[in-house]
Amino acid sequence: FLARSVVAALERHFLPAVLDLDPREIEAVHQRIWRALNPRAMTGVVSSALSLLDIALWDIAGQHAGRSVAGLLGGARTELPAYVTFGFPQYDRDQLAEAARLQRAAGFSALKLVVGVDEGGWREDAARVRTVREAVGDGVDIMIDANYLLSPTDAKLLCRAVEDCDLTWFEEPLHQNDARAMADLRAHTRIPLAAGQMEGHRWRLRELVDHQAVDILQPNACYCGGFTEARKAAHLAQIYNLPVAHGGGWPLVNMHTLAGLMNGWILEWHLGMAQVGALLFPDSPRPHGGRLTIPDKPGLGLSVDRDALRDTLLPDM
């Protein structure tokens, strides 16, 4: 988000602030950034820029050590289950059912669809969820994601309408990720709640845990401050016996968090962002049978297509 501003922040502020530091001393880099550029714990552009810098530093550390980032984070596993985000709002019900069947045929046993945007409101969302469940049958994980878009009342009504559909989680159901209201929703539904993918630092993620607002925490290294902050959030979740799953896209980065840490669980394979990853990183892994194997190459394990990267460069405005 605000990509040009993130690039400008990195070039004009972040890199000049840390160029004298050892890139392997990542906590020192974070300490310098927080003190010099973000003493009031802002998010948005600041968090995104810090995330990208941190991801690069972990890649450097992995290259230097000859180990993958997942290995440096703890090496808990070498492969992950993956779910596919397939259920986009432009599909009507018939198209949604066909898309679900296609992804099942492709080997995915966990599927996520978007809710909260249809003109028909929560009733249409409920019908779409039922359409997917009928299309794929039992034994398939189905997740729904409202992307912060529902009021507490509409979220409760939707939960009540689909509780018998055996949903694996309801992701970011409420406006602003309101932790107090999410805790109330969680107390009124049997559907597990997941959130955290767009939070910009550990204190917002902690708020979700403190309020007992989530069953699954979802730190995303591309937004929360990189692997360094995602690891801290995952350790917090582990203290409370919460799993860490992935939402918010960019699986080729976030696969390392989930593979490295003990309570890492399931990776989002968002079709649009996976296509971007395949364009920029031609040797990137892809799920097979609903599982993704982590590259054993050093760092992020990705080779960059420099020509494709130049073609995506944002010009100065």
Image: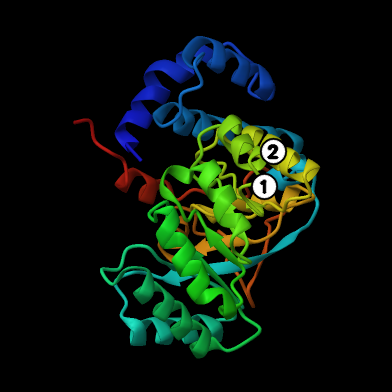
Say above or below: 206 vs 279.
Answer: above
Estimate the x, y position of residue 288 in percent, counting from the top left. Answer: 62, 74
Side (left or right) of 268 relative to 113: right
Q: Quadrant of residue 86?
A: bottom left
- 214 above or below 51? below
In percent of width and height, residue 93 lies at 35, 83
Q: Are marks 1 and 2 in contact (CB under 8 Å)?
A: yes
Q: Is residue 55 above or below residue 177?
A: above
The front one of 150 and 314 is 150
Q: Amino acid at mark 1?
A: Thr
Element at label 2: helix
Closer-to-camera residue (112/32): 112
Question: Marks 1 and 2, how far apart in space?
Answer: 7 Å
Left or right of 26 in this view: 102: left
What amino acid type should be assigned to the residue bearing mark 2? Arg
Residue with the mark numbered 2 = 231
Is 284 left or right of 176, judged from the image as shown?
right
Residue at (48%, 30%) from the top-left corner?
47
The extreme left residue here reads 317
Q: Residue at x 45, y 67 (%)?
A: 157
Mark 1: secondary structure: helix
Is residue 108 visible in the rendered structure shown here? no
Disc with the residue nearer the chain's start (1 vs 2): 2
Give the residue at x 68% y 58%. 294
The percent position of residue 1, horizontal first and vertical second, equals 36, 41
Residue at the (42%, 58%) spot, across then down: 153
Categorize mark 2 by other alpha carbons within 10 Å: few (<14), some (14-19), many (20+): many
* Residue that label 1 marks: 257
Residue 65, given in percent of the width and then of the height, sits at 76, 35
Crowdedness near tag 1: few (<14), some (14–19) or many (≥20) residues, C-alpha within 10 Å: many
Which label sits on residue 188? none
